[in-house]
Image (tube, rainbow, N blue to C red):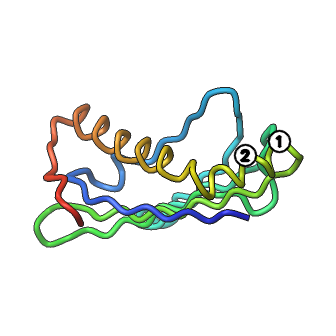
Amino acid sequence: MPTIYFHQTTSLTPEQYVTEGSGGIWERLNYDWSDADNVVLTTTDSNIWGGASSHTYTFTRKADGTTDIDVVVIREGKNLKGRLLGLVVGTIGRSVLEKAFVNSVKAIEARNGLVTDRRAA
């Protein structure tokens, strides 16, 4: 079961971030916003993901006004296609997911009129 970690620093607040989406693969997610600094998206139904599949976003507000975003993605395939895609996601697909994560932060920043320095966090 692949577990993938990402990290990004942004000018966004936790409330301005947290989206999902993919082409050809669908899932229904339960969003737990009970702690706005630790948002958990649990897969409730999907054509390929099941079991412990989830996304956990941990937001750490920093004194300089930025927010660190740490993401943990767990993908457990519920059928052959899901298990095969899980292997891809956990290996060569990680960079594709990371790029999508970084691009989503940039897009939400742009939508909110914000810009963040992209140097290594």
What residue is rendered at 71% in x and 41% in y? Answer: 28
Q: Nearer the viewer, residue 52 or 4?
A: 4
Q: Where is residue 56 in the image (x, y as percent from the top left)?
A: 54, 62
Q: Which image quarter is the C terminus in?
A: bottom left
Outermost residue on the front side: it is 92
In this view, the residue farthest toward the right is 79
Residue at disc 2, secondary structure: helix
**Residue 34, image x and y in percent?**
53, 64
Q: Up-down: is 103 above or below 14?
A: above
Residue furthest left as drawn? 64
Q: Which of the numbered marks, if any, corresponds to residue 85?
A: 2
Inspect the image, locate mark 2, and give the three-letter code of the amino acid beneath it: Leu
Q: In this view, does 48 lie to the left or right of 89?
A: right
Q: On the image, which quarter does residue 105 sit in? A: top left
Measured as percent of width and height from the top left, residue 120 is found at: 22, 63
Is residue 86 found left or right of 113 in the rendered image? Answer: right
Circle 1 packing at 10 Å, graded few (<14), some (14-19), many (20+), is: few
Tell me, yes or no, whether the two marked residues, 2 and 1, touch with CB atoms within 8 Å: yes
Q: Is residue 23 above or below residue 49?
A: above
Give 115 or 97, whichever is nearer the viewer: 97
Q: In which quarter of the image is residue 4?
A: bottom right
Could you tell me the amino acid type at mark 1? Lys
Quadrant that contains the N terminus: bottom right
Q: Mark 1 points at which residue?
A: 81
Percent across and percent down for residue 116 are: 16, 50
Q: Is residue 91 above or below residue 48?
A: below
Q: In this view, does 2 lie above or below 77?
A: below
Q: How far apart are marks 2 and 1 (CA)?
A: 6 Å
